[in-house]
Image: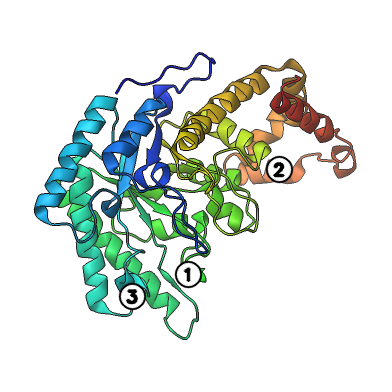
Amino acid sequence: MAKRKSRSGYEPDPKMKFTFGLWTVGNPGADPFGGPTRERIPPWKIADIVGSVGAYGVNFHDNDLIPIDATAEEAAAIKKDFRKALRDNGLKVPMATTNLFSDPVFKDGAFTSNNAAIRAYAIQKTMRAMDLGAEFGARIYVFWGGREGCETDAAKDPVEAIKRSREAMNFLCEYSISQGYGYKFAMEAKPNEPRAHIYNAVTGSYLAFINTLDHPEMVGVNPEVAHEHMAGLNFVHQVAAALEAGKLFHIDLNDQEFGRYDQDFRFASANLKHAFFLVKLLEDNKYNGPRHFDSHAYRTSDYTDVKSFAAGSMRSYMILKEKAERWNNDRAIQSIVKQVNAAAPAVSKLTKKFTKKNAKALLAADLDRVQLAKAKLPYEKLDQLTMEIIMGVQ
């Protein structure tokens, strides 16, 4: 199927590596209070939709592609159809992951289950899913522990749960190495839902956890907008921490009202200012990994509207990318930025690295706090100019 070309000037740029999941575009519109409002469609048809709006690729959980109880013959037929759809639409599969949350066996966790046999099954299922992802060319593997938590701390020792998570990740890193898959693992945090309390609830928790692994160089993070907003956190700051640590291996773009359940709205549809600064952060820091839209269309949508949802996700990113470039080149804005980032070369060089000489010089430096406090910080003006860029009048 030929990709549709936009005439808007904001058509998807292949360099952005925009991707969608089989579970996102193919979401049938069900929620905890009601069943599906759209028919379930096969993976090949989802690939056709993703291809028709000009995306770069499509990602999957193992059971998005192959049902958990499929026979070998059924699996082979599904893969054949999906592979053809990928080829016809020019799509790649940059990322794969494992569903360790839907089946009842994982009701009390997968890697952190109290049952050793369930923990072994979770690792076995993940190895097979890694095989499947590699078969389709995936080089990033995401881990989201949706059931790795508890409703009551009486049920599970949280210290032991962390140890079990480490044991699983160390094992799977070695499996990837032994198979020559070259996977980069990306850990995805979430504070709650479906469990009342999920371990490693925010991105910062995983950044600390990664350094305790046997192969920390293989493991990074996959932060998601909605998950950090559920906790009331500034997502831009979480992504900045990952970028600064060299651990932003993948990112999930969507939107979310603060403090609500996991809404998975279309990117930039709820918090436009946050979305702007996120895009600016990614582009200013030359992030070159996939930009994955882990969201879904409204329950009220039919599949025609689902296409609008997918196209709109990419279009919003491209619009905000242009606005970020405009912000970076706006004379009034950059004049304020230069003003507030006050250079003081004489003392800056003293604080770059501790030496006894630098410490002595710093202690002797004339730093008048009263005068320093008088520095002008016109942040109201800067923020207003930013808003005018976003609103299209600057």
State the mark number for residue 362. Answer: 2
Q: Gap in Å between the C-alphas at discs 1 and 3?
A: 13 Å
Single out the mark in the foreground, 2 or 3: 3
Q: Gap in Å between the C-alphas at discs 2 and 1?
A: 51 Å
Q: In this view, does 74 lie to the left or right of 381?
A: left
- Which amino acid, by three-letter code, is at mark 2? Leu
Q: Position of residue 213 (x, y in %)?
A: 33, 59
State the mark number for residue 113. Answer: 3
Q: Residues within 10 Å of mark 1 (few under 14, many from 20)?
A: some
Q: Gap in Å between the C-alphas at discs 2 and 3?
A: 54 Å
State whether residue 246 appears in this view: no
Q: Position of residue 353 (x, y in %)?
A: 57, 42
Mark 1 sits on what residue? 195
Q: In which quarter of the image is residue 139?
A: top left
The tag earlier along the polypeptide, 2 or 1, is 1
Q: Quadrant of the C terminus?
A: top right
The tag earlier along the polypeptide, 1 or 3, is 3
